[in-house]
Image: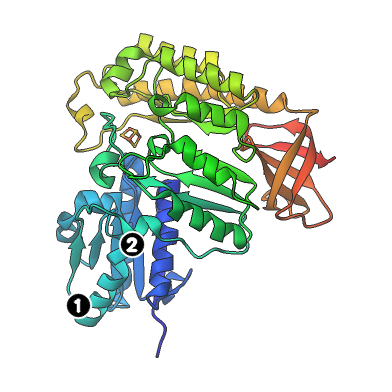
Amino acid sequence: MSKNYFYIRTFGCQMNVHDSEQLASMMIDAGFEQTEDINQAQVILVNTCSIREKVALKIVSQIGRYRQLKENNPDLVIGVGGCLAQHWGQSLLRKNVGIDLVFGTHALDRAPAMIRRIQRKGGAIVDTSFREDIPSMSICPRPDNANLQAFVTIMQGCDNFCSYCVVPHLRGREKSRPSQNIIDEIRALVAHGVKEVTLLGQNVNSYGKGLVEGLCFSDLITKIDAIDGLERIRFTTSHPKDLTEDLINCFGKLGKLCEYIHLPFQTGSNSVLGRMNRGYTREDYYTKVESLRETCPGIAISSDAMVGFPGETTTDFEATMELIDKIRFDNLFSFKYSEREGTTAVNLDDKVPEKEKSRRLSLLQELQDCHTLEMNKAMVGKAIDVLVEGISKNSSRDMMGRTRTNKVVNFRSKENLHGKTVNIHITAGYLHSLRGELS
Ligand code: SF4
């Protein structure tokens, strides 16, 4: 019997990458084989994201190219899943002849069976229903011995309804995974050589809502910290309003929790924060950052910033620049506001012209680049533990690893140190990485 190959293309964030790993596991369990060669595939799965408009446009044109492959391979099944599929639903089939399956964010686990049905009987299927439980959240992707790091989903969805964001509409309301289930997955990963886990969710620090066991996120991390053989714990993404004192204290007392947090602030203007429905002020944000730095000196902080939200004046933008200057982030992911259909921000007046948004974005990025470079240069002379991930992209004679503060370090080594934690003396700091020597 000939093999039934599938090919997956993933767009978007870490959550989506992890969803694709889970989907691939379920496909393999259902008897399909994964291929990296698209021309060999009987099934193409596109896992989509709709957080940014630019990504959405890229996905649409990519799906168009996949549909052309049907000219030479009429039995090819094309499935589109994830956030955009959830958003477009049935209309995706109407607009795009050649798509066979549309599966939403709660239908991942049902995709293999739906593909089999289409292969047997033909026709097209759309499944974008929301479910009370999300079975795919508990699927553990096949551990790969080459991987030191793994993502582990702990919750999905979001109840916050920030006025610019489509996630609550497309991923549904917050649902947390039972803690034992998470612990069992991490133990299995550690048994396969994983040393570092990143706990994933749209809003991880509100973990536990609706669970009968009555746990909160800091309780969960404390339990994970006790797992033998695990070396490092990270998490993403956290909401400033849900960053509790308990969680901040975890950074001071849990040995495996890395000294790094991604804490999106979005804007430094209180009036814009109000219109964004973020639930905190710039003063609240400062207080949390101060508390993090007091509890865990040297903690690295990264963030998300958005420019050009409707009604953002030059004074509002200056408040954002001032916040960046005062806090000094290790790294910043910055974007221009773009309208997302179905969100309340679409109805706000006072749109900021594109040209002005671009001007503000480049000023902001220029400032952040100065800070990042300055902070990386300040690392020179320090000796830091680095978990070695593999050969460096820059040179085959170098190895690359990551500090607990999530900074990339390249260094020369005659020995393959993959998977080892080594002490590196930092000799140079650049915008995107550090360079060092084995101590
Ligand atoms: S917290 Fe806000 S920005 Fe983040 S996923 Fe929820 S609604 Fe979107």
Viewer-side residue, 203 vs 87: 203
Q: Residues within 10 Å of mark 2 (few under 14, many from 20)?
A: few
Compared with residue 230, is residue 65 higher up or lower down, i.e. above or below? below
Q: Residue furthest front?
A: 213
Q: Which residue is mark 1?
A: 122
Please identify the quarter of the rendering in which residue 135 is found: bottom left
Name the colouring of the figure: rainbow
To which residue does mark 2 refer?
65
Q: CA distance from mark 2 to mark 1?
A: 21 Å
Foreground residue among 341 and 58: 341
Q: Residues within 10 Å of mark 1 (few under 14, many from 20)?
A: few
Secondary structure of the residue carrying tag 2 is helix
Dividing the picture into quarters, in which one does residue 256 lie?
Answer: top right
Residue 141 is left or right of residue 127, and the answer is: right
SS class, disc 1: loop
State the residue at coordinates (37%, 8%): 315
Is 320 situated above or below 32?
above
Determine if residue 353 is in view. Answer: yes
- Ligand 1 quadrant assignment: top left
Residue at image location 18% in from the left, 61% down from the top: 93
Amino acid type of the residue tagged 1 in the rendering: Gly
The image shows residue 280 at horizontal and vertical percentages of 36, 19
Residue at the bottom extreme, as displayed: 1
Give the number of marks.
Answer: 2
Of tags 2 and 1, the one toward the viewer is 1
Q: Tag 2: residue type?
A: Arg
Q: Where 32 sits versus 22, above or below?
A: below
Camera-side residue: 236 or 413? Answer: 236
